Image (cartoon, rainbow, N blue to C red):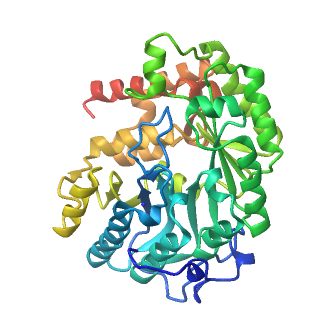
Amino acid sequence: MAGIAITRSRIYAVPSFLPSREALCRPGASGPYRSPRPAAPRSAMLVYIHVPFCRSRCRYCAFHSLPLGPASPDASPQVAAYRTCLLRELDLWAARLGRRPVESVFFGGGTPSLLPPDFQGAVLERIDRHFHLAAGAEISMEANPESLLARRAVDGYLAAGVNRISLGVQSLDDALLSRLGRPHRRADVLRAVDHLRAAGCRNLGLDLMWGLPGQDVAHWLGTLEEALRLEPEHISAYGLTLESGTPLEREHAAGRLALPEEGAQERMFLEGIRLLAAHGLEQYEISNYARPGFCSRHNLGYWTGADYLGLGPAATSTLDGRRWTDTPDQMRWQADIDAGRPDHDAEAITPHIRLEERLMLALRTCAGFELAEYTTLSGRDFEADHGRWARGLERAGLARTAGGRLALTPRGLLVSNAVVADLFERLDELGL
């Protein structure tokens, strides 16, 4: 997403099996935990660690998170129990899976950077001990700017093995940050980025949001231009979604919150793509842009159908044709680990589910869907089943077919949910 007491003098110590800090965060470098062991024969997987804690819940957030308030996480019995149980969950899966190769690790949340670096270090050490962590594995961590204001903390995360930071900026407008319920301000972002670069982080992503209350196209493009001056290797740009039950959704339903009109949001998306491309960040998925060599390997694994093991409350796993989600309730999660059954509600991924998921996820990416994979998964020919439909999308400027792949254009990505829903209806009509 341990529980061992550790003095502050040791929190930031570099484990002996790690390379120098200068090697951390360098694309193409061997990275942390380079292993001399020969490649393991089993198929590789991704590992996702869900850290459910945050300082306070943002006003748009519907993810599972547990606000801790201003108190130190070190003083929280809930955090201590989580740390201990997470390592036990890792031990449990190691006994079942053996030395399975791990290509990437992602600490998500919540706010993973709310916990001190000894937590990430302990988890990575345990993964390296139990599994076959690939040389040059991508180790990502979501972080909030206000939790990286101390250079010592930044040094500690990199020393622990993190080599990719996804910084939750969302906006560089203090008024909007306050409206969103974010705990940081613009100055915190600038200081955090300075610390990350000075510490040697060379794989930095900025997470931003568009379509915010009161925002217009010029404001959004100005936000992107300011973010680009920070020279990130990656930008994630998400349109605001009003999730049911969140404070922003309730305000909107009551008529107290106005969002940009649909036409303005369309321009934000399309003009944002062009602006980022002009500065060397190419779109590779609906919401993600990267310089060459800096796509998120972990997220690409999700979108291309890789197996992944999720650890922590509310984390989802997909392994060996089965899927399950750990319970979000921490006490029940701990009880499931005690009983050795975090996957007690696993479901089989049927051929129908697999086909729909592969189509849906691949069509989120700019590379699109390989038509031959349709035949592999369905036993049928894509051209015979959907050729006329695909050509209709092309005539409308929503898709392109080339090199044996079907991909959505930027305008097609804007309406991807409707395109995918239409395709699913076609599959149902075919009995797939």
Q: Quadrant of the C terminus?
A: top left
Nearest the eye: 426 or 358: 358
Q: Residue furthest top?
A: 255
Residue at image location 69% in from the left, 56% down from the top = 204
33 vs 54: above or below: below
Q: Residue at x 62, y 72 (%)?
A: 156
Relative to 398, say whether 338 is above or below. below
Name the side, left or right, on which 336 lies relative to 5: left
Q: Position of residue 299 (x, y in %)?
A: 53, 52
> Between residues 419 and 282, which one lies in front from this camera angle?
282
276 and 43: which is toward the camera: 276
Q: Is residue 242 something one can see in this rendering?
A: no
Left or right of 348 in this view: 127: right
Q: Where is residue 312 in the image (x, y as percent from the top left)?
A: 35, 59
Residue 162 in sight: yes
Residue drawn at x 75%, y 34% as measured from the top left: 223
Residue 72: x, y in percent? Answer: 49, 60
- Compared with 228, 262 (above or below) is above
Apparent side of residue 73 relative to residue 271 in the rendered image (left or right): left
How far across and down, in percent of the image, does residue 325 sit? Answer: 29, 52
Q: Quadrant of the N terminus?
A: bottom left
